[in-house]
Image (cartoon, grey):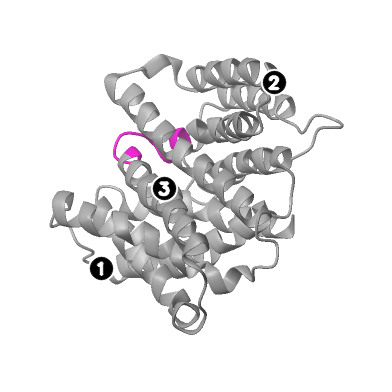
Amino acid sequence: MIYLVSVTVLWAFSFSLIGVYLAGQVDPYFAVLSRILLAVLLFSPMLLRYRFSLNLVLPVIGLGAVQLGLMYLFYYQSFLLLSVAEVLVFTIFTPLYITLLHDLLARRFNPQFLLAAVIAVLAAALMRYQSVSSQYWTGFAIVQGANLCFAMGQVGYKRLLAAHPGVTQYQLFGWFYVGAAMIAIPAWLILGGSQYPTTTLHWAVLLWLGLIASGLGYYGWNKGATEVSSGMLAVMNNALIPAGLLVNIIIWQRDTALMRLSIGCAMIGFSIWLCRKPTGRGG
């Protein structure tokens, strides 16, 4: 649990750093590539030193490609259409995807998660009901792509490591970033623009995001995912929302409709309660 809490605090700052200093200023595909390559560099000593069988390495590569590579491509595009607060709000669906995916793979279903999804949609609409636009709904759809990728990676990694309990995870995890790089490199070559970092601040933010938020953050988060139940993992995915909003409001003093935000957050809190781990259920 300590891993998930620590990374939640760490990532709370990442949303605002991307939205304030990178979105619209640095090509999103270059930003994604930079973060992933820095994470590969951080774990390269383990990649060179330790050897694992292909039946373990290849799934980790695949999970990295989805959870980090594809997710980042969706994620960075969303900041071009939405505010930081909106991106945070729309991540509320990730816990639902996690629990539904986990139930699907375990061949079980709980209808309370559908109710939670409806409440979450209403909460998101409430926070922006006065200015719904084509960009708003496009951004919403893009964030859901990121949420699905993130959820699939977490559930897949949790199940994979449950089948290999003796693995020392930090020795293996570099392959996760290799998989992400296999998506980020061609995406940048094909879709990337020429909007590169131009200031020391841009590079400093990218270094922080690559080495700390991505390199240490994703390792800590996925390791934490293997140590808690699927219900707790789902709930912790939503803990980032109030943490990120708090950072965005206090440090950058973004204007927010506090009444609608409060009501929406209360509805999100209820959806989190609905996504709690049911008593007596495994996983």
Q: Nearer the viewer, residue 97 or 255?
A: 97
* Mark toward the start of the polypeptide (2 vs 1): 2
- The kind of residue on which mark 1 rests is Thr
* Label 2 to label 1: alpha-carbon separation: 50 Å
* Mark toward the start of the polypeptide (1 vs 3): 3
In this rendering, is residue 139 above or below 206?
A: above
Q: Position of residue 228 (x, y in %)?
A: 74, 49
Q: Quadrant of residue 99?
A: top right
Q: Which residue is mark 1?
A: 199
Residue under the image location 45 percent in, 33 percent down: 86
- The kind of residue on which mark 3 rests is Val
Instruction: Judge the density around disc 1: few (<14), some (14-19), many (≥20) Cα neighbours within 10 Å.
Output: few
Residue under the image location 34 percent in, 46 percent down: 76
Q: Position of residue 121 (x, y in %)?
A: 52, 19
Q: Which residue is mark 3?
A: 66
Residue span colored magenta = 78-87
Q: In what quadrant of the picture does the N terminus appear?
A: bottom right
